[in-house]
């Protein structure tokens, strides 16, 4: 049995991918988990279709079911059909599916480092796919692989062919996966969260490549994501999933501008770009239900403020009035009522007054010309062969009760800066003063005492929590190490801290793996609060979270800051999140601060060419992306051999004579930023010469 050709399916007008009323279950020791329920979905020829929802809603299960990637015997399709190019996938043999995967349907996964074999060079991995599905010589496959990498804008494609995956950046590895996915000219490309871990500039490049190559080749795309702004920029149609069901579907513009289902409305309300800065977001109360014991009727009704008696019956997809092609699974549509009631809020989503800005005589934290260098190998005399220049003369201050956001691409030194501030790294040069005290001059015992006043929350709470101890012990670990509290009082302190971050006390005996990502981040925040700090370094605290959980964590951080007067050093590549929480923003590039000032000044009226490109690359819910001068290179220069003068000049579209000299921070215009007028400093000697109209707008 062979699959029909793409041309035959396109000419017939049938969907290239079609799921009809598919139900799928996982048999487990806890019973059957109904992962998908009555899912109907179609991807048309040449169409880019989005699939969105929170973690645990069934997005990845749906995408993997299309080409039967779920482990054999682990899942059972109990109803419905799945068709690819008009052929029933469920009836196909495993031999037929091996021909489909990679040839007719390709898949790009979320984490390219896990998807690529770390022991095989890039060129061989691509040629293996080509020669597995087509009868071509090794030389022809090699030439095609190099051409594909060049089409994906991979610089020096021949060198990359001979590289291992760990030698490439995250964005470069994702381009390699795209080249591999398009290597056999597939009819369908499934992209499962392909840009989640990427910076906004790299994400914009990868999305542009995906869209242009799909259009050129007529490839249909099923794009799985939780980022609604990415869907707005990329997708023609969108399906919203919740608890294994499609709850809304239709043209992307209609669904995002006129959402009909309360869940879609709640997702949009959770976005920081739609909220007012420094004020709480409307977070969705509760969590996705346990699919081993799903609620009766509409799965969203336990979290929905508009729920009523009929919601205990499961609603079908109903057409949305006055919106062609849009439908939603909500009884309110049948009753002629709009589902516009406020979404049920969590406790922290209450009115939070902006934290009053303290004005101490001296800043809580001050960095002066801080440098960090990491040696690269040593010769036989023990001398370093070279150095990675991670931080290159950083100057910044942070006041009590203030939030300073730090943004920039991966490799620009953000995390190194956070570790230096938390004293997890010792700087190679410069001074760090906390509360007026030079940390380098302190004896070890004095340093141990003062470092309780600054704590850190890491990006991945799963990796930063000890999996062998219950969470109450993890929370009070800093106090137990200090040894200043009696053992009997520690558990009571853990309960108090759990209440502070809105965790239930009955959960404290559990282990980290028994919690969701958002709950684990709350545990990490509680642990950071244990010593009673004045400053918390937050290193990408929401990057791995869904938008609804992200809103809950941001609300929690704002509430804690208001009540406890905490200062935050907030590190993130999510510009919308930084705009929402920060009083001031510092933009980093190759270990330098290239622009710093009030959040509104820097992010809504960026002055440095790098900041302009960074802000313009942020996907927006409404309208096309802002125009901005393109970068001359997609990759950061080496931080082993730094460019002379302005570090950004090798990528800057406005580079001119004078850029080869070191650039000081110069004062830009002063304007009313949140919390008062702030000094706006920019590291560019052409500040007054750059053309106007390139600054990105605020959130749409």
Image (cartoon, rainbow, N blue to C red):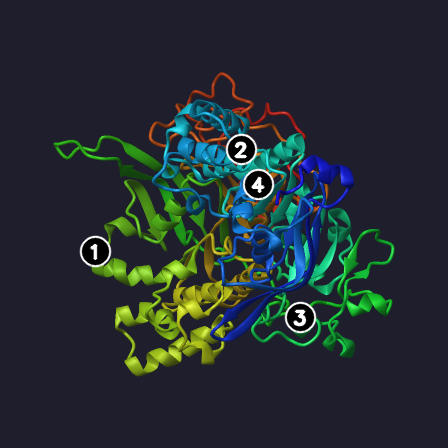
Instruction: Check the image and report above or below for 673 versus 492.
Output: above
- Upstream in sequence: badge 2 or badge 1: 2
The earlier-in-sequence mark between 3 and 1 is: 3
Of circles 4 and 3, which is in front? 3
- Is residue 480 something one can see in this rendering? yes
- Residue at image coords 58%, 70%: 291
The Cα–Cα distance between marks 3 and 1, rounded to whole angstroms, is 58 Å
Q: Nearer the viewer, mark 2 or mark 1?
A: 2
Q: Which residue is mark 1?
A: 443
Badge 2 vs badge 1, beta-carbon distance below 8 Å: no
Where is residue 466 drawn, in percent x and y? 34, 65
Find disc 2 in the rendering and name its residue.
183
Q: Secondary structure at mark 1?
A: loop
Q: Secondary structure at mark 4?
A: helix
The mark nearer the N terminus, 1 or 4, is 1
Q: Nearer the viewer, mark 3 or mark 1?
A: 3
Q: Earlier in the sequence, mark 2 or mark 4?
A: 2
* Distance between the alpha carbons at the discs numbered 2 and 1: 60 Å
Q: Are marks 4 and 3 in contact (CB under 8 Å)?
A: no
- The residue to which callout 3 is attached is 299
**Label 4 to label 3: alpha-carbon separation:** 42 Å
């Amino acid at each position: 049995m062979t699959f029909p050709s793409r041309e035959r399916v396109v000419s017939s007008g049938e969907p290239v991918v079609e799921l009809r009323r598919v139900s799928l279950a996982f048999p487990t020791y806890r019973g059957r988990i109904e992962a998908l329920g009555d899912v109907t979905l179609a991807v048309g020829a040449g169409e880019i279709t989005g699939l969105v929802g929170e973690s645990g809603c069934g997005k990845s299960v749906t995408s993997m079911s299309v080409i039967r990637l779920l482990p054999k015997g682990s899942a059972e399709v109990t109803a419905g059909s799945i068709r690819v190019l008009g052929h029933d996938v469920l009836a196909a043999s495993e031999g037929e599916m091996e021909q489909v995967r990679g040839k007719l349907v390709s898949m790009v996964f979320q984490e390219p480092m896990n998807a690529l074999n770390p022991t095989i060079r890039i060129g061989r991995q691509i040629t293996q796919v080509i020669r597995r599905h087509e009868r071509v010589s090794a030389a022809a496959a090699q030439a095609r692989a190099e051409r594909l990498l060049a089409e994906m804008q991979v610089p020096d494609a021949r060198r990359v062919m001979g590289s291992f995956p760990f030698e490439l950046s995250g964005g470069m590895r994702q381009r390699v996966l795209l080249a591999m996915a398009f290597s056999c000219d597939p009819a369908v490309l499934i992209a499962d969260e392909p840009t989640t871990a990427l910076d906004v500039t790299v994400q914009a490049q990868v999305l542009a490549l995906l869209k242009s190559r799909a259009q050129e080749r007529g490839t249909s795309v099923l794009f799985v994501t939780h980022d609604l702004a990415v869907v707005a920029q990329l997708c023609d149609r969108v399906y919203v999933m919740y608890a294994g069901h499609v709850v809304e579907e239709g043209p992307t513009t209609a669904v995002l501008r006129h959402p009909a289902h309360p869940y879609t409305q709640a997702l949009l309300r959770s976005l920081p770009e739609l909220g007012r800065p420094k004020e709480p977001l409307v977070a969705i109360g509760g969590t996705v239900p346990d699919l081993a014991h799903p609620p009766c009727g509409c799965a969203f009704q336990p979290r929905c403020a508009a729920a009523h008696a009929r919601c205990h019956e499961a609603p079908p997809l109903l057409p949305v009035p006055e919106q062609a092609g849009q439908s939603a699974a909500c009884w309110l549509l049948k009753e002629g009522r709009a589902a516009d009631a406020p979404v049920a809020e969590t406790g922290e989503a209450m009115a939070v007054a902006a934290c009053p800005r303290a004005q101490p005589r001296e800043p809580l934290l001050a960095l002066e010309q801080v440098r960090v260098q990491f040696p690269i190998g040593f010769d036989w005399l023990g001398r370093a062969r070279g150095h990675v220049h991670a931080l290159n003369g950083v100057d910044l201050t942070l006041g009590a009760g203030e939030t300073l956001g730090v943004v920039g691409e991966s490799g620009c030194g953000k995390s190194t800066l956070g570790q230096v501030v938390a004293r997890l790294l010792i700087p190679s040069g410069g001074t760090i003063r906390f509360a007026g005290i030079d940390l380098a001059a302190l004896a070890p015992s004095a340093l141990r005492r003062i470092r309780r006043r600054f704590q850190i929350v890491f990006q991945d709470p799963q990796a930063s929590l000890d999996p062998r101890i219950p969470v109450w012990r993890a929370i009070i670990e800093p106090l137990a190490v200090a040894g200043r509290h009696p053992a009997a009082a520690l558990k009571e302190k853990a309960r108090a801290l759990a209440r502070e971050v809105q965790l239930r006390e009955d959960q404290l005996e559990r282990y980290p793996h028994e919690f969701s990502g958002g709950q684990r981040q709350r545990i990490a925040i509680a642990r950071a609060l244990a010593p009673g700090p004045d400053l918390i370094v937050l290193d990408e605290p929401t990057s791995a979270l869904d938008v609804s959980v992200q809103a809950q964590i941001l609300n929690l951080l704002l509430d804690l800051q208001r009540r406890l007067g905490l200062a935050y050093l907030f590190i993130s590549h999510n510009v919308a999140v930084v705009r929402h929480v920060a009083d001031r923003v510092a933009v980093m590039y190759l270990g330098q601060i290239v622009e710093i000032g009030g959040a509104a000044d820097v992010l809504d009226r960026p002055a440095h060419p790098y900041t302009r490109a960074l802000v313009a690359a942020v996907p927006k819910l409404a309208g096309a992306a802002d125009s901005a001068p393109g970068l001359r290179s997609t990759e950061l220069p080496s931080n082993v051999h730094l460019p002379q003068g302005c570090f950004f000049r090798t990528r800057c579209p406005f580079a001119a004579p004078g850029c080869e000299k070191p650039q000081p921070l110069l004062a830009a215009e002063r304007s009313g930023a949140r919390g008062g007028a702030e000094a706006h400093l920019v590291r560019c000697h052409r500040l007054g010469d750059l053309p106007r109209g390139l600054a990105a707008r605020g959130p749409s």
